[in-house]
Amino acid sequence: MDLERLLSDRLAPAFATVAGTPVDPTVRRSPRADFQSDAALALARRLGRSPRDLAAEVLEHAALDDVCASAEVSGPGFLNLTVADRTLADLVSRLAGDDRLGVPPAAAPETVVVDYSAPNVAKEMHVGHLRSTVIGDAAVRLLDWLGHRVVRVNHLGDWGTPFGMLIEHLTDLGEAEAAHGLSVGDLDSFYKAARAKFDADEVFRERSRRRVVALQGGDESTRRLWRLLVEQSERYFLSVYDLLDVTLTGGDFRGESAYNDLLADVVDDLDRLGLLVPSGGADCAFPAGFTGRSGEPLPLIVRKGDGGYGYPATDLAALRQRTGELAATRLLYVVGLPQQQHFAMVFAVAGAAGWLRPPARAEHLGFGSILGADGRMLRSRTGGSVKLVGLLEEAVARATDLARAKNPDLDAATAAEIGRAVGIGAIKYADLSTDRRRDYVLDWERMLSLDGNTAPYLQYAYSRIRSVFRRAGTAPRPGAPVVLAEPSERALAIELLGFAGVVGKVERSLEFHHLASHLHRLATTFSAFYERCPVLRAPDELRQSRLLLADLTARTLRQGLHLLGIRTLERM
Ligand code: ARG
């Protein structure tokens, strides 16, 4: 049980008695005591009473004696709570014996679909796909650890009119040649060459158009060429996932084309429900509350003028399949913020059609852009878009160099292993440690720095604790009594007890920067403890207790980083 919860549970009945209705005690960490509640302030305003009197009355009714060393009214009417050392020690002992570090499995596990990564066939993944992949992977890891049934969906862009030109370009190049270029990741030049011919050459354009018709009509030889494009691209994307160390596999691809057979049905249903309006030759839904600049209702184009279906129709079909066939109650879409309106409209239409009904709900986990050092959209030196693999390789190379510089005796294999864990970890952590809605600057120096709120700092903190155990030559004695003699020991205990609460919050919000800051605070608190409290040189009982605190810190760091998709190393 985390401390905020414990104190909240003790204060809530007292607040309810005083207020006559339930009140959230809003217990938070505070620099003035261990914890503080400011709920009396708002409540006093509502009741027209003095906040200090009200706070004092709450304290009289609250059963805190067995858990708090002191509880007092302060300032305008805050409640300052200091937890008893005994309580802290008991809770930490219990934590030490718990494989799950105090985090209970979900009381009501649900089926969650996480739609993430979703690059486009025969097109290079860009940094937006990087963010989606990293954030989605963290969501999958966390929800899975909490015991939810998680379905990963890689909504690959594998359908649409560009495939006419892509297939024609493939036949021009020759299959073997094209397959080779794609599988080694030369996607951009493939796409651009096709595009250039399409723009310049009327004959090619006409061939491409006929190809789209053949593809949609199910022509077998065209299908085969299309599959070749998809398979080679998938193979390349899987190599990026491998480098990025994410849990996505080949089995998770479920491209847009997978919904083709459902589209007509989706449109028929919407039509039957009276949700479609013909507009400029197309069939559109006009979900309530979406208007353009001059107040005109905004359409979601479900069937295009030429009878084809596009991106919105596919998302509607996918959503219906997820809540229907997969019986998912939580749908997550990890896609950049520019698509916010698209998803809001899709969710609204699905709601109106009855495909998205409580308890099922959909959330767009939108995110901002990655910026270059100049504060503008990240661009390569030549001004083109940055190739994702290039970015990852640079991170690994830089981290490997840093590892070698720090320890010139490292053998090549170890340096490479450290470089990979640290380089990829740094990229992921830079992403996950900022509020995902915000843009952030890709700053190599900062994200690879060994101090600061970075992956290398946390990875280093972990391996440093492991080295203490190597020197101690022993693991902590199970069940060793916890002694909290020094203030820095107490502070560490409080941080350790906070892990479960943070994980619970992130389960709901999927705001991973809260988990990242918690781990960072834990690591800095540990380092203050380690400076002030000798571990190996302490007398036996204290030594055992401190080893136990150190071990719990390491386990929490490892588990927390693992949830973020970041590896820890025994030595660094
Ligand atoms: N392929 C799309 C893109 O690159 C992202 C797809 C996101 N998922 C979805 N269900 N629409 O922008």
Image (tube, rainbow, N blue to C red):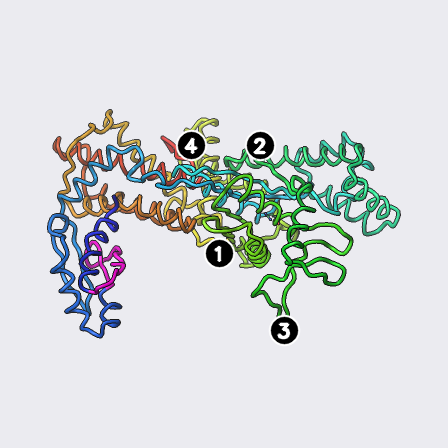
**Residue corresponding to mark 4:** 408
User: Closer to the camera: disc 1 or disc 2?
Assistant: 2
The label on residue 321 is none
**Lower position in the chain sequence, tag 4 or tag 1:** 4
Alpha carbon separation for disc pair 3 and 1: 27 Å
User: Closer to the camera: disc 3 or disc 4?
Assistant: 3
Is the C-beta separation of discs 3 and 4 under 8 Å?
Answer: no
Determine the secondary structure under disc 1.
loop
**Lower position in the chain sequence, tag 3 or tag 4:** 3
Residue 444 left/right relative to 65? right
Measured as percent of width and height from the top left, residue 436 is found at 47, 53
30 in magenta: yes
**Lower position in the chain sequence, tag 1 or tag 2:** 2
Packing grade of label 4 (10 A; few <14, some 14-19, many >=20) is: few
In the rendered image, is residue 377 in sight? no
**Residue corresponding to mark 2:** 251
Is the C-beta separation of discs 4 and 1 under 8 Å?
Answer: no
Packing grade of label 1 (10 A; few <14, some 14-19, many >=20) is: some
Which residues are the magenta region? 19-39
Which three-letter amino acid code belongs to the residue tagged 2?
Gly
Is the C-beta separation of discs 3 and 1 under 8 Å?
Answer: no
User: Closer to the camera: disc 4 or disc 2?
Assistant: 2
Residue at image position (54%, 58%) is 374
Quarter of image, res 457 = top left
Position of residue 27 relative to residue 1, above or below, is below
Alpha carbon separation for disc pair 1 and 2: 29 Å
Residue at image position (26%, 29%) is 469
**Residue corresponding to mark 1:** 437
Task: Identify the image quadrant of the C terminus.
Answer: top left
Which three-letter amino acid code belongs to the residue tagged 1?
Arg
**Residue corresponding to mark 3:** 294
